[in-house]
Image: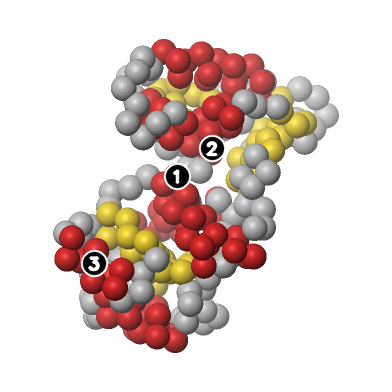
Amino acid sequence: MRVLVVEDDPGIADLLVRGLRRAGYTAGSVSSGHQALAAAPEPDVVLLDLGLPDLDGVDVCRRLRRRSDVAIIVVTARGEEGDRVAALDEGADDYLVKPFGLAELLARIRAVLRRVHPVDASGPEVLRHGPLEIDLRTRKVTVAQREVALTPKEFDILESLAVDPGRVVTRQEILERAWDAHWYGPTKVLDVHIAALRRKLDVPGLVETVYGRGFRLGTADADPAGPVRR
């Protein structure tokens, strides 16, 4: 799957491209509307900012849609209803307002691809980090080629950390992803699942606690000749 990021802020573009590549996509970026329209080969997904230096993003969306059924997801700081309506009316498949988490963006991409390219979207999407491998389609997890049986909640927690290794994911973000979008219950339930996840993965330092903030996926390497080490 080829994803084109159309974003004139190089810092944001770089973060998105790196996150997409870690998630298994072929990703690149351009910084203007004309570059987006001239991109070749044509991508499967376009992440389109509206505030471009040469063309309005809505106009780029319109031109892309006239010639192609490429999946278009608007990613912009413009959250007004009028902007949303204009982009969706011109053919955008989804609309995401900055700031947003990478996990949500990847979920939006998967949802759009299921609607637009159901055959292409059926292929496996694998996250890899050190000895850890996560197949998002089959929900299979392996550590140094050892399959790990996780509960649905444990898998969702691990996925929320693995989509952007190293980034601190807050407790609330994990609870909203793994339990409910409006979770108001006790957060200690998360600690129980994190402890179980660590036991099953059996990789010291892989799931790190960042006190007062949340959790993140740390750095860990597998020693193919022996035990897993940090």
- Quadrant of the rendering where the C terminus is positioned: top right
Residue at point 31% right, 69% down? 88
Residue beneath disc 1: 103
Please provide percent x and percent y for residue 111.
49, 55
Could you tell me which secondary element the residue under label 3 belongs to? helix
On the image, the x and y values in percent for residue 161 come to 49, 35
Q: CA distance from mark 3 to mark 1?
A: 24 Å
Counting other residues with Cα less than 10 Å from the Cα at mark 3, is it few (<14), some (14-19), or many (20 or more)? Answer: few
Q: Residues within 10 Å of mark 1 (few under 14, many from 20)?
A: some
- Location of residue 226 with respect to 46 vertically, above or below: above
The amino acid beneath tag 2 is Glu
- Which numbered disc flags the more N-terminal residue, 3 or 1? 3
Which residue, as the protein is rendered here, is positioned at the far right?
225
For discs 2 and 3, the disc positioned in front in the rendered view: 3
Give the image location of residue 177, x and y in percent: 43, 35
Task: Give the total of numbered labels.
Answer: 3
Where is mark 2, residue-wise? 159
Q: Which mark is residue 85?
A: 3
- In the shown orientation, is residue 89 left or right of residue 26? left
Q: Secondary structure at mark 1?
A: helix
Please say if 160 is above or below 188: below
Picture residue at 59% right of the left edge, 63% below the top: 118
Q: Secondary structure at mark 2?
A: helix
Q: CA distance from mark 2 to mark 3?
A: 32 Å
Q: Are marks 1 and 2 in contact (CB under 8 Å)?
A: yes
Mark number for residue 155? none
For the N terminus, the quadrant is bottom right
